[in-house]
Amino acid sequence: MVLPVPSPVPAAPAVPRRRRRRGLVAVLIAIPLALLVVGVAVWFAFNATRPTPPAAGTTTFAQPLRIPALAPSTVEDGVRVFRLEAREGRTSFVAQGETPTLGYNGEYLGPTLVAARGERVRVEVRNALDESTTVHWHGMHLPAAMDGGPHTPIAAGETWAPEWLVDQPAASLWYHPHLHGRTREQVDAGLAGMFLLTDDEEAALTLPREYGVDDVPLIVQDRSFSADGAFGGGLGMQFDGVLGDTILVNGTIAPYFEASTERVRLRLLNGSSARMYDFAFDDGRPFDLIGTDGGLLASPVESTSIPLSPGERAEIVVTLTPGERVVLRSQAPDPALHAGGAAFDVLELRAAASLVASPEVPPTLAILPGAREADAAAQRSFEMSGHEINNREMDLGRADFTATVDTSEVWTVRNDNPLPHSFHVHDTQFRVLAVDGAPPPARLSGWKDTIALEWDREYRLLVRFEDYADPTTPYMYHCHLLWHEDQGMMGQFLVVEPGQKADLRRPEGDSDDHDDH
Ligand code: C2O
Ligand code: CU
Ligand code: CU
């Protein structure tokens, strides 16, 4: 019997051997060439079309820096009470028209809250928007039910009044909405403010601390404006979220600050939703890095630049000479962050013709406990990839893990993408044990709650959970590039008493089949 002939394959045309070899050579050249062209196109799409602020050195600093008001407070039954109202507003940023914005107690951004360690605080947050929101106290150690994450929405017209004991070192914290899927939109519209903590140790140091005079909050954001003045417009959405071509500091475009003292403490907050910065002065002058996210460093670190990813803070002290002008700018971020971008201007410091003398920055700032990995009760790892963590998207109904109160854990975090990502944990301030097995740079030696992740490096973090257990309400961890967070690059964990059973509650009104934004 004749075997069936397999489906006919067209016979190869008779090509002379030498021609065939030349064809092969052509293909071998064409493939890498095509890959190169695609690579260049992707690089071009990623970098050359990104909204970019005007080049460093080209800004005319025309507006005095706005300083957010200090939030008034009253003391009621031993509790310091603040009142915030999230509301709609209109802000005049650009000539082409007013910008619809959101703000707390005002048109854009919010007042600065200040509280001391040891105080009980309550913040009565009224939502005067026509949509739900939440308010999260970024960097604060507090019970999960007070944390203001996606499990505690405030419906339009409602008031939420979380109360907690401030019990952590002096630090520059901040607050912003955290509604699941809508965080970027609400923060970018203007809902954000600073929350400064003081303590006796910090108060005893000779550091500048006169608010708005020699101790200045700088909420740095990037925005773009459309033809009618509204936010947005231009190229906007990128792999990392929405970037803008205009830098705002405390809501001021092209700001200058008139310094009256020899030393100025700047509390830098990267309040942008996606942009990475590397802050430096235009003359390369050194400054003292004195604090990071969760408090003062052990001693000042003389630096010429400080990189900050979205959500991170740094406190620096810069020394001025009478009559000079010096510009705070951002240099191009570290290429390992894959954030792209070139240098641009942020703020001009104008020193008065005569400056009030300031004491030198003390050589010792704080006592930091040694970070010892041996105490860890658990080890966990977090792979950041795409818009997922450990190959999972955020699910409000799923606790990704459960930790035990009053224990420490070692978390290993890695960014698997050549895309910018960061890592933020609620409730706690962590310490960086190692970056790729080596001790961290001095700027990462203190308290941190958010860290930029260079591609393919391994960050080992010592994370501790103290005081508060709650088997029903979780805390969050996530990438702080807010669009990534909204896309689901977030997870949640419960902190329970030893032996207590986790019993995560889905927030009211949330179902597990909600659509992806
Ligand atoms: Cu500043 Cu969970 O965020
Ligand atoms: Cu947070
Ligand atoms: Cu990310």
Image (spheres, rainbow, N blue to C red):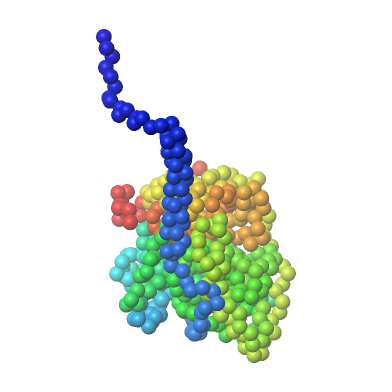
- Residue 66 in the image: state x and y as whole percent: 49, 81
Q: Quadrant of residue 265?
A: bottom right
Q: Residue furthest right?
A: 363
Q: Is the N terminus in the top left, top right, bottom left or bottom right quadrant?
A: top left
- Residue sitting at 61 percent across and 83 percent down? 325
* Nearer to us in this view, 368 or 455: 455
**252, 228: nearer the viewer:** 228
Q: Taking 262 as reference, is 127 above or below it?
A: above
- Image point (62%, 49%), residue name: 436
User: In which quadrant of the rendered image does the C terminus lie?
Assistant: bottom left
Task: Tell me, yes or no, if residue 251 can be seen here.
Answer: yes
Does residue 373 sit above or below 267 in this rendering? above
| Residue 106 at x, y percent in the picture | 40, 78
Query: Where is residue 211 drawn, in percent x and y?
Result: 57, 80
Residue at the limit of the structure toward the bottom, as seen here: 353
* Residue 164 shows in this picture: no
The structure residue drawn at horizontal position 30% and vertical position 49%, both measured from the top left corner, is 513
**Residue 487 image position (x, y, % from top left):** 38, 55
Number of numbered discs: 0
Query: What's the residue at 43%, 67% (across, down)?
Result: 51
From the viewer's side, name the closer residue of 419 and 383: 419
Out of 482 and 194, give the one closest to the viewer.
482
In the image, taking residue 185 as reference, residue 423 lies left or right, namely right
